[in-house]
Image (spheres, rainbow, N blue to C red):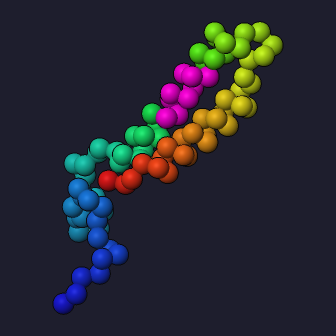
């Protein structure tokens, strides 16, 4: 009897009768944690730049800050391996 490798649970998860992960596994994946941390650090970095480097009319706009956060979060989440 062969096992279909495509229907395997994620490492660290044990499927229950419905095929879902065990309810006692509430730890986020590395990708999620790294993306969240990258987004938060980008927001702090933009605040520091606006407060201490680009003072006055030259501050980064909200649109630029949002774009930087989105791009950096994507890049970090893409680069971090799953598991």
Q: Is residue 82 left or right of residue 67?
A: left
| Residue 39 drawn in magenta | yes
Outermost residue on the bottom side: it is 1
Q: Is residue 20 left or right of residue 81?
A: left
In the displayed structure, 9 sits above or below 1; it is above
The residue stretch that appears in magenta: 38-46
Quadrant location, the N terminus:
bottom left
Residue placed at 42% from the left, 45% from the top? 32
In the displayed structure, 8 sits above or below 51; it is below
Percent of width and height locating residue 82:
37, 54
Percent of width and height locating residue 78:
49, 51
Residue placed at 63% from the left, 9% from the top? 52
Percent of width and height locating residue 19:
29, 68
Place residue 63 in its image quadrant: top right
In the displayed structure, 16 sits above or below 12; it is below
| Residue 64 drawn in magenta | no
Residue placed at 29% from the left, 45% from the top? 26
Residue 45 can be seen, yes or no: yes
Residue placed at 49% from the left, 43% from the top? 76
Place residue 14 in its image quadrant: bottom left
Residue 18 can be seen, yes or no: no
């Amino acid at each position: 009897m062969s096992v279909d490798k495509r229907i395997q649970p994620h490492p660290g998860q044990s499927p229950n009768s419905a095929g879902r992960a065990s309810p006692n596994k509430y730890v986020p994946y590395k990708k999620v944690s790294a993306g969240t941390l990258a987004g938060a650090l980008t927001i702090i970095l933009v605040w520091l730049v606006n407060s201490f480097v680009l003072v006055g009319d030259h501050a980064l706009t909200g649109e630029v800050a949002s774009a930087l956060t989105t791009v950096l979060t994507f890049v970090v989440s893409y680069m971090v391996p799953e598991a």
